[in-house]
Amino acid sequence: QVQLVESGGGLVQAGGSLRLSCQASGSIFSISAMGWYRQAPGKQRDLVALITSGATTIYADSVKGRFAISRDNAKNTVYLTMDALKPEDTAVYYCYVNAKTYGHSDKDFWGQGTQVTVSS
């Protein structure tokens, strides 16, 4: 199995910055995609940003130019740097990893979620 530990959420004023981190551990053979999703109250969970093993990145239109995703393959860690935060960025942010564990095929894994609150 794969465990994901997230950190870096919190309360920030509009225009401020936060950096989320998520480290994967466990019986990992390889990791393909890593990313972040978010879910605001009463809404569905949506993709924020994704980065592949080849470092290709995908961003939601609403965060392009403000958020940056990166990964450290040696540490099995993905980061999300969030600048120019807006109140509408308020949500629970979930780390996502697609990984192959020893003896198993690719599978999706999710973190427990970290709250990001942006005050106006």
Image (tube, helix red, strand yellow):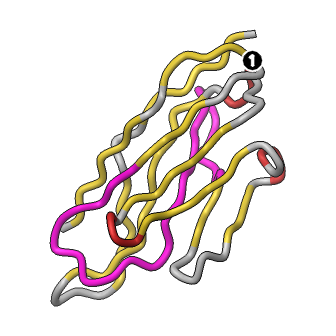
Does the magenta segment cover residue 31?
A: yes
How many labels, in total? 1
Residue at 17% over, 85% down:
102
**Up/down of 9 relative to 96, above or below:** above
Give the extent of the magenta segment. Answer: 22-48
**Residue drawn where x is 68% and y is 69% of the image:** 57
Is residue 52 toward the left or the right of residue 102 in the image? right
For image coordinates 47% across by 45% down, the residue present is: 94
Give coordinates of residue 5: x percent, y percent.
30, 46
**Considering only vertical position in the picture, is 83 above or below 2?**
above
Quarter that holds the C terminus: top right
Density class for disc 1 (Cα within 10 Å; few <14, some 14-19, many ≥20) is: some
- In the figure, is residue 19 to the left or right of 26? right
- What is the three-letter code of the residue carrying label 1? Ala
Q: Which residue is farthest top?
A: 120
Res 87 → quadrant: top right
For the point 65% across and 51% down, the residue is 48
Q: Viewer-proximal residue, 63 or 76?
A: 76
Name the residue beneath numbered marker 1. Answer: 14
